[in-house]
Amino acid sequence: MQPAIFLDRDGVIIENREDYVRSWADVSFIPAALHALRVLSPSGWAIVIVTNQAAVGKGLITLRAAEEINRRVVAEVVRHGGRIDAAYLCPHRPDENCDCRKPKPGMLLRAARDLDLDLSRSVMIGDAITDMQAARAAGVRGVLVKTGRGLTELCSFVGTPWFDIARDLADAVESLVQIERIAI
Ligand SMILES: [Mg+2]
């Protein structure tokens, strides 16, 4: 079984948008994210995107268009020497009470079944506390990045964090690669 790095998309790989990423024109890569994914590429981790896209359930964008944006994000990562092994998208609105929308762990659990992943050695990198809650519920270590909504989320967070904190995806990846080197 292989460990995975689960990546939230908006706010981690590409910039978050208040009114949702609705088209390719809305996509803007976070500086150093593509480089970070290239660094991660030769590692032994499966790299899996898990993204909430309630804009689909709200009728603001079709499922097909949302999946097409994901495909193009993945293609851009690959073009820059990176790798994404799978991408999961939750299209539901919060009130639909599905089991895949983060903070629920559904997408992580499904990926674990599909790709035979070792969740206990896996990591979820996200910019929202709900990403960290999904990670905890799946038994995955969480890393909150300060890009996207991260800094705001961190400032309003009350309690003892059960997750790690990184400046951005590049910073998170740097720590993970060091850990892997030590593990080797
Ligand atoms: Mg996000």
Image: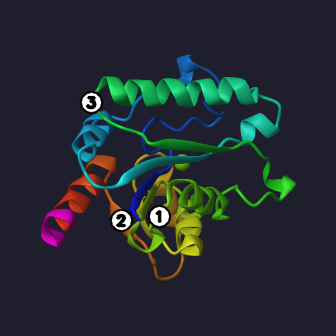
| Residue 67 image offset from top left, x and y in percent | 63, 30
Q: Secondary structure at mark 1?
A: helix
Which residue is at 54% across, 42% downward? 87
Classify the position of the C terminus by image quarter: bottom left
**As shown in the figure, which amino acid type bears the numbered disc 1?**
Leu
Q: Quadrant of residue 166?
A: bottom left
How crowded pointer 3 is (Cα within 10 Å; few <14, some 14-19, many 20+) is rated as some
Where residue 163 is drawn, which disc sits there?
none
Q: Mark 1 sits on what residue? A: 154
How crowded pointer 2 is (Cα within 10 Å; few <14, some 14-19, many 20+) is rated as some
Q: Secondary structure at mark 2?
A: strand
Q: Are marks 2 and 1 in contact (CB under 8 Å)?
A: yes
Does the magenta segment cover residue 181?
yes
Q: Mark 2 sits on what residue? A: 165
Where residue 81 is drawn, which disc sits there?
3
Q: Answer left or right for 44 relative to 106.
A: left
- Span shown in magenta: 180-184
- The residue most toward the top is 25
| Residue 85 image offset from top left, x and y in percent | 44, 42
**As shown in the figure, which amino acid type bears the numbered disc 2?**
Ile
Q: Main secondary structure of the magenta part?
A: helix
Pointer 1 or 3: first along the chain: 3
Between tags 2 and 3, which lies in front?
A: 3
